[in-house]
Image: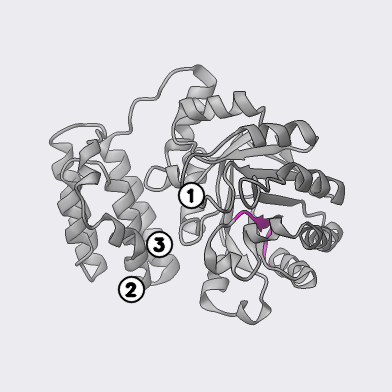
Amino acid sequence: MNIGSFELPNALFAAPMAGVTDRPFRQLCKALGVGYAVSEMVTSRKDLWNSLKTSRRANHEGEVGPIAVQIAGTDAPMMAEAAAYNIDRGAQIIDINMGCPAKKVCNKWAGSALMQDETLALQIIEAVVAACAPHNVPVTLKMRTGWCQSHKNAVVLARAAESAGVQMVTVHGRTREQGYGGAAEYDTIAAVKQAIKIPLIANGDITTPEKAKFVLDYTGADAVMIGRAAQGRPWIFREIEHYLTTGTHLLPPTVDEIHTVMLEHLHDLYAFYGDLTGMRMARKHISWYTKGLAGSAQFRHTMNTLQTIELQLQAINDFFVELKTKNERLVYIDNDADSDPDASSALAA
């Protein structure tokens, strides 16, 4: 499929996730089979553009294209300016965030809160499209099914967005009210697909190759976008692509391969964020990588106490050496994660 002039290698997308889809993670996903990856949300507030957080999110040095940046805000002129700002820094596609359910975003009437104000939402869309048009940069939109169960307006907004010049729409199969609770539903996504001619991407609860195929078949979507299921398992994209192509499953990756993947990812984090912040950012990824593996509950508990890169890397090497004595390939033990009291603290680190 295409987004504007960009031809994508497959129909597997990595969802934008704050604190997760930084440049190191996007590069990793692209190396492991994702066809398209979107940046973390970048604010439209000009006074924050020089902050360390925003400057990192706008850093695409060495990244394989197309480079897609998601912007968020509540003011149409500011959103247009944010689009131009990111284009100047290498963005090749601009994505408008109308899907984030986080309270700190919605309380400012950004993210999925915009779905409550269709007039403002359309003003923002039109302003961003106008700002991107002179640069021939496509604009895409990510949203939810609606604000709440009684106010599902994804079809209406998708049609309006298409008319305004948006070139792709992604719908997460939950309302803002749901957050990430309950189950995603795909009837609304299917209805949006029937209502528009531009590509429609399905998102929400796509955690296995079988689920990806089901959602594609059920909704008629042009692609699937995967978020939380890729945390600690970025090779899910190649697993899904193989299943969609052949109808068969790849063997689980080897312990050696994932050990190497993990170390390369961590070194990218250290280089990108600096030693101290990189070490702290690495903790949640280490927790995700090892969750469910034999002996990982105690390992994750210990990992959260380590305060240097050297100790962190040594602990990882020791863990994988021990893991390989049990199996050549990754084997997950479901109850290991459930018994880990430190998993939540690791994710919040």
Residue 60 visible: no
Question: Viewer-nearest of labels 1 and 2?
Answer: 1
State the extent of the magenta-drawn residues as a range.
89-99
Question: Looking at numbered disc 2 in the image, what kind of residue is underneath it?
Answer: Leu
First of labels 3, 2 by sequence position: 3
Decide if residue 254 is on the left or right side of residue 249: left
Which residue is depicted at the point 55% across and 79% down?
Answer: 51
Name the one closer to the observer, 304 or 191.
191
Q: Residues within 10 Å of mark 1 (few under 14, many from 20)?
A: some
First of labels 3, 1 by sequence position: 1
To which residue does mark 3 refer? 269
To which residue does mark 1 refer? 180
- Outermost residue on the front side: it is 150
Name the one closer to the observer, 205 or 307.
205
Looking at the rendered structure, the secondary structure element under dot 1 is loop
Quadrant in which residue 13 is drawn: top right
Mark 3–mark 2 distance (CA, rounded to whole Å): 10 Å
Looking at the rendered structure, the secondary structure element under dot 2 is helix
Question: Looking at numbered disc 1 in the image, what kind of residue is underneath it?
Answer: Tyr
To which residue does mark 2 refer? 276
**Does 91 lie within the magenta span?**
yes
Name the one closer to the observer, 333 or 98.
98
First of labels 1, 2 by sequence position: 1
Q: Quadrant of the C terminus?
A: bottom left
Q: Residues within 10 Å of mark 2 (few under 14, many from 20)?
A: few
Rendered image: mark on residue 71: none
Q: Are marks 3 and 1 in contact (CB under 8 Å)?
A: no
Q: Quadrant of the N terminus?
A: top right
Looking at the rendered structure, the secondary structure element under dot 3 is helix
